[in-house]
Image (cartoon, grey):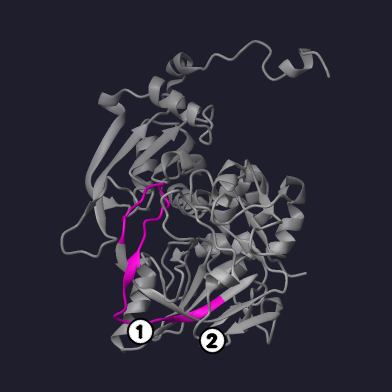
Amino acid sequence: MPKDLRTFLAEIANEVITIRAETDPLTNCGTLISQSPGPLLMENLKGYPGWRLCDMLLVRRSTQAVALGTTPDRVVPELASLLAKGGSPTVRVSTGPVKEKKFIGDNLDLRQLLPVCVHSEIDLQPYIGAGMTIFRDPETGITNSSFIRTMIRPQQPYPMFIYSPHNNIILKKWWDRGERMPCVLVIGHHPAMEMAVNYLGPHLSKWGEMELASTLMREPVEMVPCETVDLEAPARAEIVIEGFIPPEVRLPEGPFGDFSNNYIPWVSDQPVLEVTAVTRREDAIYRHINSTMYTDHQALMLVTDAMIYDHVVKSTGTDIHEVFRPAWGGGICTVIQMTQHQDGDAERAMEAALEFPAGKMIITVDTDIDPHIAEDVVFALSTRVNPSRHINVKHNQAGFFFDPSSEPIPGKPYYRRQIGRAMINACMPPTSREAERKNYMRARPKGGNRFMLSDFLPKG
Protein backbone atom coordinates (compact mmCIF):
# COMPACT_ATOMS: atom_id res chain seq x y z
CA MET A 1 0.00 0.00 0.00
CA PRO A 2 1.32 3.49 -0.82
CA LYS A 3 2.49 5.49 2.18
CA ASP A 4 0.30 8.18 3.71
CA LEU A 5 -0.71 9.52 7.11
CA ARG A 6 -2.76 6.43 7.89
CA THR A 7 -0.06 3.92 7.12
CA PHE A 8 2.26 5.90 9.38
CA LEU A 9 -0.25 6.04 12.24
CA ALA A 10 -0.65 2.26 11.93
CA GLU A 11 3.13 1.81 12.18
CA ILE A 12 3.39 3.85 15.38
CA ALA A 13 0.10 2.67 16.90
CA ASN A 14 1.79 1.47 20.08
CA GLU A 15 3.05 5.00 20.75
CA VAL A 16 -0.19 6.88 20.02
CA ILE A 17 -2.17 8.36 22.91
CA THR A 18 -5.89 8.35 22.06
CA ILE A 19 -8.31 10.83 23.65
CA ARG A 20 -11.99 9.82 23.38
CA ALA A 21 -13.36 12.51 25.71
CA GLU A 22 -14.67 15.66 24.00
CA THR A 23 -12.02 18.24 23.14
CA ASP A 24 -12.54 21.72 21.70
CA PRO A 25 -10.36 23.06 18.85
CA LEU A 26 -11.11 26.63 19.92
CA THR A 27 -10.43 26.37 23.66
CA ASN A 28 -8.35 23.41 24.80
CA CYS A 29 -6.82 21.37 21.96
CA GLY A 30 -3.75 23.63 21.99
CA THR A 31 -2.89 23.04 25.64
CA LEU A 32 -3.73 19.33 25.58
CA ILE A 33 -1.46 18.81 22.59
CA SER A 34 1.36 20.76 24.21
CA GLN A 35 1.14 18.55 27.30
CA SER A 36 1.36 15.30 25.36
CA PRO A 37 4.70 13.45 25.56
CA GLY A 38 4.21 11.84 22.17
CA PRO A 39 1.83 11.14 19.25
CA LEU A 40 -1.74 12.13 20.02
CA LEU A 41 -5.08 11.29 18.37
CA MET A 42 -8.26 13.12 19.40
CA GLU A 43 -11.46 11.31 18.40
CA ASN A 44 -14.25 13.54 19.72
CA LEU A 45 -13.96 17.15 18.52
CA LYS A 46 -16.60 19.61 19.73
CA GLY A 47 -18.64 20.90 16.81
CA TYR A 48 -17.10 18.48 14.31
CA PRO A 49 -18.77 15.06 14.62
CA GLY A 50 -16.91 12.24 12.89
CA TRP A 51 -13.61 14.12 12.71
CA ARG A 52 -10.31 13.04 14.25
CA LEU A 53 -7.25 15.22 14.90
CA CYS A 54 -3.63 14.14 15.25
CA ASP A 55 -0.44 15.93 16.34
CA MET A 56 2.95 15.34 17.99
CA LEU A 57 3.85 12.70 15.42
CA LEU A 58 7.55 13.56 15.19
CA VAL A 59 8.61 14.75 18.63
CA ARG A 60 10.43 11.50 19.32
CA ARG A 61 13.47 10.08 17.55
CA SER A 62 11.64 6.73 17.54
CA THR A 63 8.80 7.98 15.33
CA GLN A 64 11.16 10.03 13.16
CA ALA A 65 13.03 6.77 12.57
CA VAL A 66 9.82 5.01 11.51
CA ALA A 67 9.05 7.83 9.06
CA LEU A 68 12.49 7.46 7.46
CA GLY A 69 12.77 3.68 7.70
CA THR A 70 15.84 3.72 9.92
CA THR A 71 16.87 3.45 13.58
CA PRO A 72 16.70 6.32 16.11
CA ASP A 73 20.48 6.69 16.27
CA ARG A 74 20.68 7.00 12.47
CA VAL A 75 17.89 9.55 11.86
CA VAL A 76 20.08 12.57 11.04
CA PRO A 77 22.69 10.72 8.91
CA GLU A 78 19.95 8.82 7.02
CA LEU A 79 17.97 11.97 6.31
CA ALA A 80 21.17 13.74 5.20
CA SER A 81 21.87 10.90 2.76
CA LEU A 82 18.35 11.04 1.31
CA LEU A 83 18.38 14.84 0.97
CA ALA A 84 21.67 14.63 -0.94
CA LYS A 85 19.91 12.57 -3.62
CA GLY A 86 17.51 15.41 -4.44
CA GLY A 87 14.08 14.98 -5.99
CA SER A 88 12.63 11.87 -7.63
CA PRO A 89 9.68 11.70 -10.06
CA THR A 90 6.10 11.79 -8.83
CA VAL A 91 3.33 9.90 -10.66
CA ARG A 92 0.08 11.38 -11.96
CA VAL A 93 -3.12 9.51 -11.18
CA SER A 94 -6.69 10.27 -12.24
CA THR A 95 -8.19 10.25 -8.75
CA GLY A 96 -7.49 9.30 -5.16
CA PRO A 97 -8.85 9.21 -1.60
CA VAL A 98 -8.61 13.01 -1.26
CA LYS A 99 -11.39 13.28 -3.86
CA GLU A 100 -13.99 11.37 -1.84
CA LYS A 101 -15.77 14.59 -0.77
CA LYS A 102 -15.74 17.83 -2.74
CA PHE A 103 -16.83 21.35 -1.81
CA ILE A 104 -16.57 23.89 -4.65
CA GLY A 105 -17.51 27.56 -4.66
CA ASP A 106 -16.39 31.10 -3.90
CA ASN A 107 -18.01 31.38 -0.46
CA LEU A 108 -16.63 28.35 1.30
CA ASP A 109 -16.26 28.75 5.08
CA LEU A 110 -13.22 26.86 6.35
CA ARG A 111 -14.38 27.22 9.95
CA GLN A 112 -17.41 25.12 9.13
CA LEU A 113 -15.59 22.65 6.91
CA LEU A 114 -12.51 21.96 9.04
CA PRO A 115 -11.74 21.69 12.80
CA VAL A 116 -9.14 24.48 12.70
CA CYS A 117 -7.56 25.14 16.11
CA VAL A 118 -6.51 28.15 18.15
CA HIS A 119 -2.83 27.51 18.97
CA SER A 120 -1.86 30.00 21.69
CA GLU A 121 -3.56 32.16 24.32
CA ILE A 122 -3.21 35.50 22.51
CA ASP A 123 -4.02 34.24 19.00
CA LEU A 124 -7.06 36.15 17.80
CA GLN A 125 -8.21 33.51 15.32
CA PRO A 126 -7.78 29.79 14.67
CA TYR A 127 -4.91 28.98 12.32
CA ILE A 128 -4.02 26.24 9.86
CA GLY A 129 -0.48 25.43 10.93
CA ALA A 130 0.09 22.16 9.04
CA GLY A 131 -0.85 23.46 5.59
CA MET A 132 1.77 22.43 3.03
CA THR A 133 1.55 24.88 0.13
CA ILE A 134 2.11 24.10 -3.54
CA PHE A 135 3.05 27.10 -5.71
CA ARG A 136 4.13 26.73 -9.36
CA ASP A 137 6.72 28.96 -11.02
CA PRO A 138 4.95 30.38 -14.13
CA GLU A 139 8.24 30.43 -16.06
CA THR A 140 9.80 27.05 -15.22
CA GLY A 141 6.73 25.05 -14.27
CA ILE A 142 8.58 23.76 -11.17
CA THR A 143 6.62 23.80 -7.94
CA ASN A 144 7.72 24.97 -4.51
CA SER A 145 6.23 23.97 -1.17
CA SER A 146 6.52 25.15 2.41
CA PHE A 147 4.50 25.39 5.59
CA ILE A 148 2.61 28.68 5.65
CA ARG A 149 0.47 29.72 8.59
CA THR A 150 -3.02 30.72 7.46
CA MET A 151 -5.37 32.76 9.64
CA ILE A 152 -8.94 31.49 9.40
CA ARG A 153 -11.12 34.56 9.89
CA PRO A 154 -14.92 34.24 10.15
CA GLN A 155 -15.11 34.92 6.42
CA GLN A 156 -12.99 34.82 3.27
CA PRO A 157 -10.35 35.73 2.24
CA TYR A 158 -7.76 34.25 4.63
CA PRO A 159 -4.46 36.07 5.36
CA MET A 160 -1.29 33.99 4.83
CA PHE A 161 2.11 34.80 6.32
CA ILE A 162 4.38 34.11 3.34
CA TYR A 163 7.95 34.57 4.57
CA SER A 164 9.71 31.91 2.43
CA PRO A 165 12.09 33.61 -0.04
CA HIS A 166 11.39 30.91 -2.65
CA ASN A 167 7.64 31.40 -2.35
CA ASN A 168 8.01 35.16 -2.57
CA ILE A 169 10.04 34.85 -5.77
CA ILE A 170 7.27 32.80 -7.38
CA LEU A 171 4.51 35.02 -6.02
CA LYS A 172 6.17 38.12 -7.47
CA LYS A 173 6.34 36.53 -10.93
CA TRP A 174 2.59 35.96 -10.95
CA TRP A 175 1.83 39.42 -9.61
CA ASP A 176 4.17 41.08 -12.11
CA ARG A 177 1.91 39.56 -14.76
CA GLY A 178 -1.10 41.07 -13.01
CA GLU A 179 -2.45 37.58 -12.30
CA ARG A 180 -3.71 35.78 -9.24
CA MET A 181 -1.35 33.01 -8.20
CA PRO A 182 -2.95 29.55 -8.00
CA CYS A 183 -2.26 27.89 -4.66
CA VAL A 184 -2.90 24.59 -2.93
CA LEU A 185 -2.80 23.85 0.81
CA VAL A 186 -2.28 20.18 1.64
CA ILE A 187 -3.20 18.95 5.13
CA GLY A 188 -2.26 15.48 6.30
CA HIS A 189 0.12 13.05 4.59
CA HIS A 190 3.06 10.84 5.50
CA PRO A 191 5.53 12.71 7.75
CA ALA A 192 8.32 12.14 5.22
CA MET A 193 6.42 14.57 2.98
CA GLU A 194 6.30 17.08 5.84
CA MET A 195 10.06 16.76 6.18
CA ALA A 196 10.46 17.38 2.45
CA VAL A 197 8.28 20.48 2.62
CA ASN A 198 10.50 21.83 5.40
CA TYR A 199 13.55 21.71 3.09
CA LEU A 200 15.28 25.09 2.72
CA GLY A 201 18.08 24.34 0.28
CA PRO A 202 18.47 25.43 -3.37
CA HIS A 203 16.31 23.56 -5.84
CA LEU A 204 14.05 25.96 -7.76
CA SER A 205 15.69 25.18 -11.12
CA LYS A 206 15.63 21.41 -10.62
CA TRP A 207 12.70 19.96 -8.69
CA GLY A 208 10.08 20.76 -6.08
CA GLU A 209 9.43 19.47 -2.60
CA MET A 210 6.84 16.98 -3.85
CA GLU A 211 9.65 15.33 -5.84
CA LEU A 212 11.84 15.43 -2.74
CA ALA A 213 9.00 13.71 -0.86
CA SER A 214 9.20 10.86 -3.38
CA THR A 215 12.86 10.43 -2.42
CA LEU A 216 12.24 10.54 1.34
CA MET A 217 9.26 8.17 1.08
CA ARG A 218 11.23 5.88 -1.25
CA GLU A 219 8.25 5.69 -3.62
CA PRO A 220 6.65 8.06 -6.15
CA VAL A 221 4.14 10.45 -4.62
CA GLU A 222 0.77 10.05 -6.32
CA MET A 223 -0.44 13.42 -7.63
CA VAL A 224 -3.98 14.16 -8.82
CA PRO A 225 -5.32 17.18 -10.80
CA CYS A 226 -7.06 19.84 -8.75
CA GLU A 227 -10.67 20.92 -9.31
CA THR A 228 -10.39 24.69 -9.72
CA VAL A 229 -6.70 25.53 -10.14
CA ASP A 230 -4.12 24.36 -12.68
CA LEU A 231 -2.08 22.40 -10.15
CA GLU A 232 -1.71 18.84 -8.91
CA ALA A 233 -2.02 17.75 -5.27
CA PRO A 234 -1.10 14.56 -3.40
CA ALA A 235 -3.86 12.04 -4.09
CA ARG A 236 -3.50 10.34 -0.71
CA ALA A 237 -3.65 13.52 1.38
CA GLU A 238 -6.37 13.92 3.98
CA ILE A 239 -7.46 17.41 2.86
CA VAL A 240 -6.63 19.71 -0.06
CA ILE A 241 -7.62 23.39 -0.10
CA GLU A 242 -7.51 25.12 -3.51
CA GLY A 243 -7.52 28.82 -4.25
CA PHE A 244 -5.78 31.93 -5.53
CA ILE A 245 -3.60 34.65 -4.01
CA PRO A 246 -4.56 37.96 -5.68
CA PRO A 247 -2.15 40.86 -6.20
CA GLU A 248 -2.55 44.11 -4.32
CA VAL A 249 -4.78 42.64 -1.61
CA ARG A 250 -3.58 42.72 1.99
CA LEU A 251 -5.29 42.10 5.31
CA PRO A 252 -4.02 42.32 8.90
CA GLU A 253 -2.54 39.02 10.06
CA GLY A 254 -1.62 38.07 13.63
CA PRO A 255 -0.86 37.94 16.44
CA PHE A 256 0.27 34.32 16.32
CA GLY A 257 2.78 32.50 18.53
CA ASP A 258 5.12 31.06 15.94
CA PHE A 259 8.34 29.08 15.51
CA SER A 260 10.51 30.53 18.28
CA ASN A 261 7.51 30.76 20.64
CA ASN A 262 7.26 34.54 20.26
CA TYR A 263 4.61 36.81 18.72
CA ILE A 264 6.57 38.37 15.85
CA PRO A 265 5.53 40.39 13.99
CA TRP A 266 2.61 41.24 16.25
CA VAL A 267 0.29 42.25 13.43
CA SER A 268 1.21 42.96 9.81
CA ASP A 269 -0.55 43.27 6.46
CA GLN A 270 -0.16 40.05 4.47
CA PRO A 271 -1.41 38.48 1.20
CA VAL A 272 -4.66 36.55 1.28
CA LEU A 273 -5.98 33.23 0.04
CA GLU A 274 -9.29 33.17 -1.85
CA VAL A 275 -10.54 29.59 -1.45
CA THR A 276 -12.31 28.03 -4.43
CA ALA A 277 -12.48 24.35 -3.44
CA VAL A 278 -11.91 21.88 -0.63
CA THR A 279 -11.56 18.17 -1.31
CA ARG A 280 -11.00 15.55 1.38
CA ARG A 281 -11.35 11.99 2.43
CA GLU A 282 -14.77 10.84 3.61
CA ASP A 283 -13.44 10.28 7.15
CA ALA A 284 -10.61 12.79 7.01
CA ILE A 285 -8.09 13.07 9.84
CA TYR A 286 -7.19 16.69 10.54
CA ARG A 287 -3.40 16.92 10.82
CA HIS A 288 -2.61 19.72 13.23
CA ILE A 289 0.80 21.12 14.16
CA ASN A 290 0.45 23.26 17.27
CA SER A 291 3.06 26.00 17.22
CA THR A 292 3.83 26.03 20.93
CA MET A 293 7.06 24.68 22.45
CA TYR A 294 8.14 21.03 22.27
CA THR A 295 5.79 20.10 19.43
CA ASP A 296 6.15 18.98 15.81
CA HIS A 297 6.55 22.65 14.93
CA GLN A 298 10.12 22.51 16.23
CA ALA A 299 10.70 18.79 15.54
CA LEU A 300 10.50 19.42 11.79
CA MET A 301 13.71 21.45 12.10
CA LEU A 302 15.23 17.99 11.75
CA VAL A 303 15.54 18.64 8.02
CA THR A 304 17.95 21.54 8.49
CA ASP A 305 19.80 19.52 11.14
CA ALA A 306 20.46 16.89 8.49
CA MET A 307 21.62 19.52 5.97
CA ILE A 308 24.04 20.99 8.53
CA TYR A 309 25.31 17.51 9.42
CA ASP A 310 25.96 16.63 5.78
CA HIS A 311 27.73 19.90 5.01
CA VAL A 312 29.91 19.90 8.13
CA VAL A 313 31.01 16.29 7.65
CA LYS A 314 31.77 16.70 3.94
CA SER A 315 33.46 20.10 4.14
CA THR A 316 35.53 19.63 7.30
CA GLY A 317 35.97 15.89 7.78
CA THR A 318 35.40 16.33 11.50
CA ASP A 319 33.96 13.50 13.60
CA ILE A 320 30.30 14.54 13.90
CA HIS A 321 27.78 12.30 15.67
CA GLU A 322 24.61 14.39 15.93
CA VAL A 323 23.19 17.80 15.03
CA PHE A 324 20.17 19.02 16.97
CA ARG A 325 18.28 22.31 17.17
CA PRO A 326 16.34 21.99 20.44
CA ALA A 327 12.88 23.35 21.04
CA TRP A 328 14.13 24.57 24.40
CA GLY A 329 16.49 26.81 22.40
CA GLY A 330 13.59 28.40 20.55
CA GLY A 331 14.78 26.81 17.32
CA ILE A 332 17.59 29.35 17.04
CA CYS A 333 20.33 27.34 18.76
CA THR A 334 22.22 24.41 17.21
CA VAL A 335 24.01 21.77 19.26
CA ILE A 336 26.63 19.68 17.45
CA GLN A 337 27.74 16.50 19.20
CA MET A 338 31.23 15.52 18.07
CA THR A 339 34.58 14.07 19.05
CA GLN A 340 37.30 16.69 18.83
CA HIS A 341 40.51 14.86 17.84
CA GLN A 342 42.68 17.92 17.21
CA ASP A 343 42.63 21.51 18.39
CA GLY A 344 40.42 23.53 16.07
CA ASP A 345 38.04 20.69 15.07
CA ALA A 346 35.14 22.28 16.93
CA GLU A 347 35.83 25.73 15.50
CA ARG A 348 35.98 24.36 11.95
CA ALA A 349 32.70 22.50 12.45
CA MET A 350 30.96 25.61 13.77
CA GLU A 351 32.31 27.82 10.98
CA ALA A 352 30.85 25.38 8.45
CA ALA A 353 27.50 25.31 10.27
CA LEU A 354 27.32 29.10 10.00
CA GLU A 355 26.73 28.70 6.26
CA PHE A 356 23.24 27.38 7.09
CA PRO A 357 20.32 28.90 9.03
CA ALA A 358 21.70 27.30 12.19
CA GLY A 359 20.49 30.09 14.48
CA LYS A 360 22.42 32.61 16.52
CA MET A 361 24.17 30.15 18.86
CA ILE A 362 26.15 27.09 17.77
CA ILE A 363 27.40 24.87 20.55
CA THR A 364 29.72 21.87 20.22
CA VAL A 365 29.64 19.13 22.86
CA ASP A 366 31.28 15.74 23.40
CA THR A 367 29.69 12.29 23.16
CA ASP A 368 29.15 12.13 26.94
CA ILE A 369 26.72 15.04 26.55
CA ASP A 370 23.26 14.24 25.21
CA PRO A 371 22.30 17.20 22.97
CA HIS A 372 18.62 16.37 23.50
CA ILE A 373 18.84 17.01 27.25
CA ALA A 374 19.02 20.68 28.22
CA GLU A 375 20.62 19.91 31.59
CA ASP A 376 23.46 18.08 29.84
CA VAL A 377 24.13 20.97 27.48
CA VAL A 378 24.06 23.51 30.33
CA PHE A 379 26.50 21.30 32.25
CA ALA A 380 28.90 21.41 29.29
CA LEU A 381 28.50 25.18 28.96
CA SER A 382 29.14 25.65 32.66
CA THR A 383 32.13 23.33 33.16
CA ARG A 384 33.88 23.15 29.78
CA VAL A 385 33.74 26.70 28.46
CA ASN A 386 36.31 29.38 29.27
CA PRO A 387 34.46 32.45 27.93
CA SER A 388 37.71 34.26 27.17
CA ARG A 389 38.86 31.43 24.88
CA HIS A 390 35.90 29.34 23.79
CA ILE A 391 33.30 31.90 22.64
CA ASN A 392 33.66 33.57 19.25
CA VAL A 393 31.11 36.22 18.23
CA LYS A 394 30.41 37.04 14.57
CA HIS A 395 28.85 40.45 13.98
CA ASN A 396 26.29 41.59 11.37
CA GLN A 397 25.18 38.08 10.42
CA ALA A 398 21.93 37.05 8.73
CA GLY A 399 19.26 36.90 11.41
CA PHE A 400 16.23 34.66 11.77
CA PHE A 401 12.97 36.50 11.21
CA PHE A 402 11.19 34.88 14.16
CA ASP A 403 13.95 35.85 16.60
CA PRO A 404 12.70 39.05 18.30
CA SER A 405 16.28 40.06 19.21
CA SER A 406 17.27 40.23 15.53
CA GLU A 407 17.15 43.61 13.81
CA PRO A 408 15.52 44.65 10.53
CA ILE A 409 17.82 45.75 7.72
CA PRO A 410 16.82 49.18 6.36
CA GLY A 411 15.59 49.00 2.78
CA LYS A 412 15.31 45.19 2.78
CA PRO A 413 12.16 43.02 2.85
CA TYR A 414 10.56 42.49 6.25
CA TYR A 415 11.92 38.94 6.54
CA ARG A 416 15.56 40.00 6.07
CA ARG A 417 17.18 40.68 9.43
CA GLN A 418 20.63 40.72 11.01
CA ILE A 419 22.16 39.73 14.34
CA GLY A 420 25.39 38.63 15.99
CA ARG A 421 26.07 34.89 16.11
CA ALA A 422 28.03 33.05 18.79
CA MET A 423 30.14 29.94 18.36
CA ILE A 424 30.67 28.19 21.71
CA ASN A 425 33.14 25.33 22.06
CA ALA A 426 31.82 23.28 24.98
CA CYS A 427 33.89 20.21 24.12
CA MET A 428 36.55 18.64 26.27
CA PRO A 429 40.17 19.05 25.11
CA PRO A 430 40.81 16.97 21.96
CA THR A 431 41.75 13.31 22.09
CA SER A 432 45.29 14.34 21.11
CA ARG A 433 45.57 15.74 24.67
CA GLU A 434 44.24 12.72 26.53
CA ALA A 435 45.78 13.62 29.90
CA GLU A 436 43.81 16.88 30.02
CA ARG A 437 40.56 15.15 29.05
CA LYS A 438 40.65 13.19 32.31
CA ASN A 439 39.98 16.41 34.22
CA TYR A 440 36.65 16.69 32.39
CA MET A 441 35.44 13.12 32.99
CA ARG A 442 31.97 13.17 34.51
CA ALA A 443 31.44 11.41 37.85
CA ARG A 444 28.79 8.72 37.55
CA PRO A 445 26.99 7.05 40.48
CA LYS A 446 28.26 3.66 41.56
CA GLY A 447 26.13 0.91 40.03
CA GLY A 448 25.34 2.78 36.82
CA ASN A 449 22.18 1.49 35.13
CA ARG A 450 22.52 -2.02 36.58
CA PHE A 451 20.16 -1.21 39.45
CA MET A 452 16.80 0.58 39.34
CA LEU A 453 15.27 2.37 42.30
CA SER A 454 11.81 1.08 41.37
CA ASP A 455 13.03 -2.49 41.95
CA PHE A 456 13.79 -1.66 45.58
CA LEU A 457 10.46 -0.01 46.40
CA PRO A 458 7.37 -1.81 47.78
CA LYS A 459 5.19 -3.32 45.08
CA GLY A 460 1.47 -2.60 44.88
Q: Is residue 61 above or below residue 390?
A: below
Task: Give me the residue at 45% from left, 63% from top.
Answer: 149
- Front label number (1 vs 2): 2
Task: Give me the residue at 72% from left, 16% from top.
Answer: 453
Q: How many marks?
A: 2
Q: Picture quarter containing residue 433?
A: top left
Q: Position of residue 52 (x, y in %)?
A: 68, 60
Question: Of 442 and 31, which appears nearest the observer?
Answer: 31
Question: Of 137 and 226, which appears nearest the observer?
Answer: 226
Whether residue 452 can be seen here: no
Task: Give me the residue at 68% from left, 68% from top.
Answer: 284
Per the model, the C-alpha gap separating discs 1 and 2 is 23 Å
Task: Give me the residue at 27% from left, 35% from top.
Answer: 392
Whether residue 382 can be seen here: yes
Q: Is residue 392 above or below residue 142?
A: above
Question: Which residues are the magenta region?
Answer: 241-267
Q: Secondary structure at mark 2?
A: loop
Which residue in the structure is indicated by mark 1? Answer: 174
Which residue in the structure is indicated by mark 2? Answer: 105
Query: For the residue marked with disc 1, what is the amino acid?
Result: Trp
Quadrant the N terminus occupies: bottom right
